[in-house]
Amino acid sequence: MEVLTRTDQLRAAVAKARQAGARIAFVPTMGNLHDGHLSLITTARTRADVVIASIFVNPAQFGPDEDYETYPRTLERDQALLASQGTDFLFTPTVAEVYPHGDTTRTSVEVTGITDRLCGASRPGHFRGVTTVVSKLFNMVQPDVAVFGQKDFQQLQVIRRMVEDLDFPIQVMGAPTLREQSGLAMSSRNGYLNESQKQQAAGIYRALCACASDIESGARDFADLETQAVIDLADAGFRIDYFQICRQSDLEPAMEADRELAILAAAWLGDTRLIDNVQVNLD
């Protein structure tokens, strides 16, 4: 695996691969990798000849009181993991490489509407930071396909909307969420939890599955299902941000006639904010 730190190095590597007729897949990450990330590399390998991963902790998507400074940075370990998965290139740019005029004076890319709710309501500016950095990385890498995890389902849908609206010639793939044996979705922020909290945190997934089961059994009072889930999670020790049943396509609140649903939740356990979701396809 070749490690690249500059955009000109990356573009030269991509140009060489293109000249050889290679199809290119891209997996952007913020590092501190786990098996969920590695599954994205595996998926990317099935769709392309060359796999490029990036590690960049993006300051533009963190709020002023969030964990940018303390976010785990484990580059040496991450490099070894990516190499073991057969990644061809790893791009690890500095903040100055990505934002040469500073991360607060940058040109921004913003998707409206779908970013106004759920995590977008709780973390103002977060998705603007995500879409800005992903659009920059897409321009740097120019992949044929990009792979994202479904754990961040709103982010996945936001990026799909951005790609459609801006005519990026990129196929955006969502890969299934990998889970611990308890059901807890694998996440870099799980490292903030102790072992007891990790078991407790799996309660979010159990609440999502219970709601999905009720819907599949015919329940259609979505507001009542959401209220009951919030009560159950609060009783289990969580501080709830949201628990909502939405249409998958645009994340608007689901209506009774909708068939493709996403149930999304965000909650705090101690000082750690956790997100998860399940999809329900009634057809």
Image (cartoon, rainbow, N blue to C red):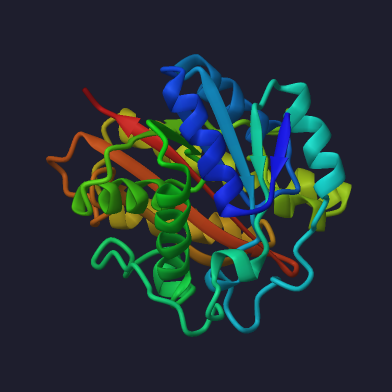
Q: Is residue 151 left or right of residue 173?
A: right
Q: In the current view of this chain or complex, which residue is farthest to the left? A: 257
Which residue is depicted at the point 53% across and 69% down?
61
Quarter holding the C terminus is: top left
Residue 163 location, x and y as percent?
Answer: 28, 48
Relative height, residue 70 to residue 230 (above, below): below
Which residue is depicted at the point 43% across and 26% down?
18
Residue 77 location, x and y as percent?
Answer: 85, 41
Residue 224 location, x and y as percent?
Answer: 33, 55
Residue 45 or residue 223, whichever sits in front? 45
Q: Is residue 153 left or right of residue 191?
A: left
Relative height, residue 126 to residue 146 (above, below): below
Residue 54 location, x and y as percent?
Answer: 61, 45
Quarter holding the N terminus is: top right
Residue 276 or residue 69, whichever sits in front? 69
Which residue is depicted at the point 54% across and 71% down?
99
**In the figure, residue 57 lies in which quadrant?**
bottom right
